[in-house]
Amino acid sequence: MRLRSVILIGLALGSSSAGKAADALTCDPASLDAMSYRLTTRAQASIVTQERHDDLNLAATRAAERALEIDPRNRMAHAILARQLLVLGEAEPAERAWRTVLESGGAVAWTGTLYDVDPRTYFFLVFDRERLRIYTFEQMAGSVKRGFYGIPEFPGADNESFWAAAGGCVDPSIRPEAEISWSDVRELKAGNWVLWFKLTRSVRVSSDRTGNTKQLREIKVALHGRTEDLEVYKPIGEDHLALRGRGPAGFQDLVRRTLVSLVDPQHRIQIPPLKPGVGW
């Protein structure tokens, strides 16, 4: 484990009282300790948007851990940890965090790129016990400022509804761009850079950047947070060593196996063997 506090929270989530605690989880800022709420909204915004020199994922994890220390009822903190612990490769505490969130009726949110729809914008993917919901970035953020190549910029700390949504607490009045029941996912395949959700029926997903709509029987998504893995190798015919990047295939595999273990108790969703090669 990288963090002693990760171990402690993992043990707490796995305790016999976890089920009772899950019943009390809330996103309501009026019910939560104010500092705990800010650590899962405004503090997360500062971590993501400000220029920094340390590890963003560790900082986001630590802020969520501190939020739980202050108020264990903060569902956003549990959901942020569920996502971030997978990014950090902490399989067991991540699964416990996911279970706590889902058993409370909550969801884990994750920004991602849907390459078959528009590689120049972001989407929100929201995972709960029953379904996968897909939202456009603009649905969560409102007016979006776009930078190089049309990529959206994350909003500031004043947009609390966006950062609450990033913690899995999405305004229920917002209608998803697409909604996919887990019973409609027949296969979940992992590659170097992406996951493929292969469906039994097609869904329509539109880009908030272009307005173009795609009809898809397969969702190819890169969930944000984990970057490439660097490895040292010796080029053929050369005397020096070099670095090359490879996609984090192990991360993709960890995400899909954690997810399927929680949402597919009947083992309907097929998980093909991980065979990372070149490309996706």
Image (cartoon, rainbow, N blue to C red):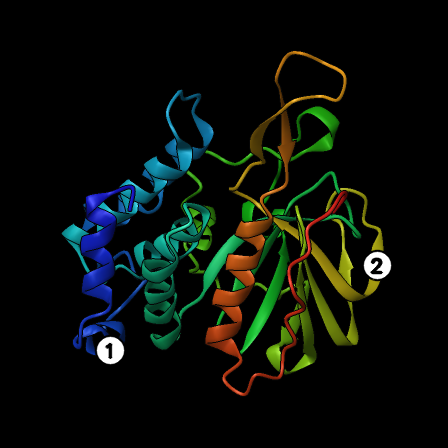
Q: Position of residue 94 (x, y in %)?
A: 37, 59
Residue behind mark 1: 19
Residue drawn 65% across and 76% down?
270
Q: Quadrant of residue 252?
A: bottom right
The mark total stands at 2
Mark 2 near mark 1, Cβ–Cβ under 8 Å? no
Residue 124 in the image: state x and y as whole percent: 58, 54
Q: Is residue 47 above or below residue 224?
A: above
Q: Is residue 246 above or below residue 250?
A: above
Is 90 in front, or is 42?
A: 90
**Going by the image, does 49 lie left or right of 140?**
left
The crowding category of the residue bearing disc 2, from other C-alpha atoms within 10 Å (few below 14, some 14 to 19, many at least 20), is some
For marks 2 and 1, give the one nearer the viewer: 1
Q: Secondary structure at mark 1?
A: helix
Give the residue displayed 54% in from the left and 88% down from the top: 266
Q: Marks 2 and 1, how far apart in space?
A: 40 Å
- Please tell me the numbered disc located at residue 214: 2
* Residue 274 tag number: none
Q: Position of residue 41 (x, y in %)?
A: 35, 45
Sequence-wise, the earlier of marks 2 and 1 is 1
Residue 240's place in the image compared with 231, above or below, is: above
As drawn, which residue projects farthest toward the bottom? 266
Which residue type carries mark 1?
Gly
Q: Which residue in the rendered view is the most extreme toward the top?
A: 239
**Amino acid type at mark 2:** Lys
